[in-house]
Amino acid sequence: MTPGSRRAIGACVILAWLAAWIVGAAIVGDALANAHPLAQLAYYAVAGIAWVFPLAPVFRWMAREG
């Protein structure tokens, strides 16, 4: 597989994951609308950072040679 096609496939996977993550985070965030503000802050801090960890293998795959 060429590096260009690997990057294109990886970009599509990343965009699909982010779309699903955003929808899920919004649903959970809506459920926390009446929660304590510190609980909301903690949730949004974790949700804003945690999306990248499941994508680490995709990033490594995209950067791989040959």
Image (spheres, rainbow, N blue to C red):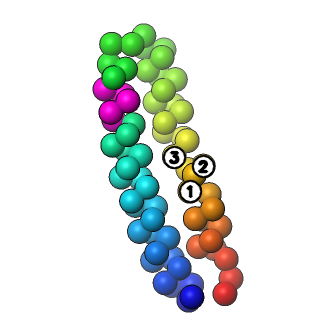
Quarter the C terminus occupies: bottom right
Q: Amino acid at mark 3?
A: Trp
Asked whether residue 29 is drawn in magenta, I would say yes
Query: Are circles 3 and 2 on residues that touch, CB within 8 Å?
Result: yes
Separation (CA) of disc 3 from disc 2: 6 Å
Residue 6: x %, y % from top left: 53, 79
Q: Is residue 26 left or right of residue 14?
A: left
Residue indicated by mark 3: 51
To which quarter of the image does residue 56 belong? Answer: bottom right
Magenta-colored segment: predominant secondary structure: helix
Residue indicated by mark 1: 55
Residue 22: x %, y % from top left: 37, 44
Tell me what residue is drawn at x 65 percent, y 67 percent.
60
Residue at the extreme top: 36
> Quick one: SS at disc 2?
helix
Query: Are circles 1 and 2 on residues that touch, CB within 8 Å?
Result: yes
Quarter the N terminus occupies: bottom right
Query: Which label belongs to residue 53?
Result: 2
